[in-house]
Image (tube, rainbow, N blue to C red):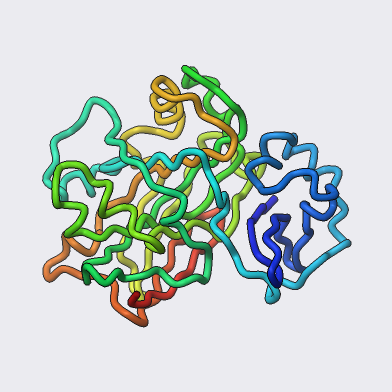
Amino acid sequence: MKLASYKYKDTQSYGVITENGVIDLKKRFNNQFHDLKSFIANHDLQKLESDLTYNEIDYALSNITYLPVIVNPDKIICIGLNYDEHRIEANRAVAAQPTIFFRFANSQIGHLEDMIIPNESAKLDYEGEIAVIIGRSGRRIAEEHAYEYVAGYSCYNDGSVRDWQQHTHQWGPGKNFVGTGAFGPWMVTRGEIGDGQELTLETRLNGEVMQHATTEMLLFSIPELISYVSTFTQLEPGDVIVTGTPGGVGSKRNPAVYMKQGDVVEVEVSQIGKLINKVSKE
């Protein structure tokens, strides 16, 4: 099942994405749950899928504007240097624990929205990643139970303003410019993807493959990340863990490749779908 947040005309909502159109869950549940985050917190998604009537479509796909899958996550926890090829190109030592930084919700955009090159820099770089959306509250989660806390998975482009990222050893400024993090197009629920199933991630810039990897190449697996992160903070429904980017980022190429106005960047993950964004100057 594919769940997305979107706008229809001037109304923000969420629902199930099908080949034939959108089933508006906010409307079906009489506006009881304001957003997808609160809906996830209060529903068994596997049961919902079996109970849903798919022949009752509310909107055509062409009539919605995609929003970030979770528009208001309490936490966006990003993992750095989690593929060895990227660690090597970044000239960083092997780490015993995950490298972690955070994003703000207002830095995110949805599928088919423009990624924004800010006025302060021309060094906006792509980073294709797989995002994990948390479905249950949990603290100090054991690795063997980690998948029980997953609501689903999505595509993510952790767009990075490289010169601002490198101002200090703290990466936050370069990771939080408005309109630089793309999240979508939807979340595929855990029941559609086997726990531990190998997923393929590919990033393309103007049709050219820039990054290609699988989840078997992660240095810290999804259960390891959930367990580690939940040790220092309580995970809540709608929290997002962005699991890291492979090698091939633009800033480490010779010559460097940064996104420019008019570019089209795609992040595709097997079993999930394709996140597409154009690039514009602020």
**Residue occupying the far bottom of the picture:** 262
Q: Residue at x 11, y 45 (%)?
A: 91
Please state if 246 lies on the left or on the right of 7 as rendered.
left
Report the front residue among 218 and 73.
73
| Quadrant in the rendering for residue 249 | bottom left
Instruction: Indicate the position of residue 266 as horizontal and vertical percent values.
Output: 43, 67
User: Relative to 44, is 91 above or below?
Assistant: below
Q: Position of residue 235 (x, y in %)?
A: 51, 29
Residue 241, image x, y percentages: 45, 40
Snapshot quadrant of residue 264: bottom left
Q: Is residue 104 above or below residue 137?
A: below
Q: Residue at x 41, y 63 (%)?
A: 179
> Looking at the picture, does residue 215 appear above or below residue 208?
above
Q: Is residue 279 left or right of residue 98?
A: right
Q: Residue at x 75, y 63 (%)?
A: 22
Q: Image quadrant for the C terminus?
A: bottom left
Quadrant location of residue 60?
A: bottom right
